[in-house]
Amino acid sequence: EAIAEALSKTGNAEYLYLAGRDWPEGRYCEAIADALIETRDAAYLYQAGNYWLDERFSAKITKALIETRDAKYLYLAGRDWPAGRYSADIGLALAKTRDEDYRYRAGCDWPVDRLDAKLVRALLRGMSAEYLFYVGRDWPRGILGKEIAQALARRNQPEYLYRAGRDWPDDRFSNVITRALIRAGDAYTMYLAGRDWPDERFSSAITEALVKAQNSYDLYLAGKDWPEGRFSERITQALIKTRDAELLFLAGRDWPEGRFDPAITQALIETRKARWLYLAGLDWQEERYTPQIAQALAETNNAEYLYLAGLHWPDGRYTDEMLRALIRTGDPKCIQLAMRDWRAERSEALMAALWERSHAHSMA
């Protein structure tokens, strides 16, 4: 007893736990358990619940562990302690902590008979969108229904709404997820939903919301990536209305057949953005290119891109009007580069036109 009393006074949780686990009858006494409880050391209180004999374990150890509010060891106790030692108060104590990770893990790893409706509600209370998504994806069947969809929808986080529509099982997904995604108004996640959600979850309302968002990049991506049956001419019309020359160019380059519309070409021409007109002449396939693109580039009087077009465009797209437009810019650097870098017949034509212009001025 003197040894037990001396050990109790040390307050050393590790050796108090070991004494409770390993000492034979006659040396162990209740003071060992009381001293361990006084330490408030969650790790060794949990270990005591795991490995001490029934006659040494008591509800006081459970109470002490609960009072530590240590999420890790409350979670481990719920996972590992046998039925006679586990208490529903452990689960409720874990639910009161702010540690979402261990609350989520409890739903994944605890015996299902410990996860009653009251505890499930408590574990989910105040949980972030990220962990609600993980819960809906990973918790075992039978302890959750579509109420998880309503909880996630209230968080108004479009990334996790999209991921729920992509990854959740059917018995947890609900149209409230779709409505919340649309209400959030985030064009990129609506594009992702159109690309990745199964057919039974996709709705034309997503298309309409994407159109309403008027984000040119995500409209372009939808035209490029959405499967057949989801693409709509409304996407084309919305992209045209943005007058975003870069994305109009990309649509002409990347959209599959059946989605490209000549109105895209006309919209690009009307922007008079020299860089994207030049790139359209360089990269667009033959059936999408029109001579009006060259004419529009000439009318920009942008010496840099007129020079580059003369350097890189094929014969069927390059025109003499572009040469004359370069001369009209009067840009000495780009004209000199053109005479140096253009293929022979183009540089010779440029020099001839320059000589002719100079001669005409001298005659005047």
Image (cartoon, rainbow, N blue to C red):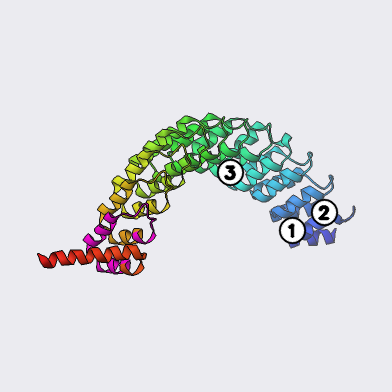
| Position of residue 143 measured from the top left corner of the image (x, y, whole percent) | 67, 33
Q: Nearer the viewer, residue 44 or 325?
A: 325
At 67% from the left and 46% from the top, the residue drawn is 66
Three-letter amino acid code at disc 3? Answer: Tyr
- Which of labels 2 and 3 is toward the front? 3
Q: Is residue 243 above or below residue 39?
A: above
Name the element at disc 3. helix
Q: Is residue 272 visible?
A: no
Residue 193 magenta-highlighted:
no
User: Mark 2 packing: few (<14 Cα in 10 Å), some, or many (20+)?
Assistant: many
Q: Is residue 160 above or below residue 318?
A: above
Residue ID for mark 1? 13
Three-letter amino acid code at disc 2? Answer: Gly
Residue ID for mark 2? 20
Q: Is residue 178 above or below residue 280?
A: above
Residue 335 magenta-highlighted:
yes
| Position of residue 2 measured from the top left corner of the image (x, y, whole percent) | 84, 61
Q: Kindly check if marks 1 and 3 are in contact, taking CB atoms under 8 A apart as contact.
A: no
User: Mark 1 packing: few (<14 Cα in 10 Å), some, or many (20+)?
Assistant: many
| Position of residue 41 measured from the top left corner of the image (x, y, whole percent) | 70, 55
Q: Kindly check if marks 2 and 3 are in contact, taking CB atoms under 8 A apart as contact.
A: no
How far is the residue under mark 1 from the one under mark 3?
34 Å
How far is the residue under mark 2 from the one under mark 1?
11 Å
Of the two numbered discs 1 and 3 on the same chain, state the one appearing first in sequence: 1
Residue ID for mark 3? 131
**Relative to 251, 85 lies left or right:** right
At 84% from the left and 47% from the top, the residue drawn is 53
Of the two numbered discs 2 and 3 on the same chain, state the one appearing first in sequence: 2
Magenta-highlighted residues: 310-338
Q: Nearer the viewer, residue 50 or 213?
A: 213
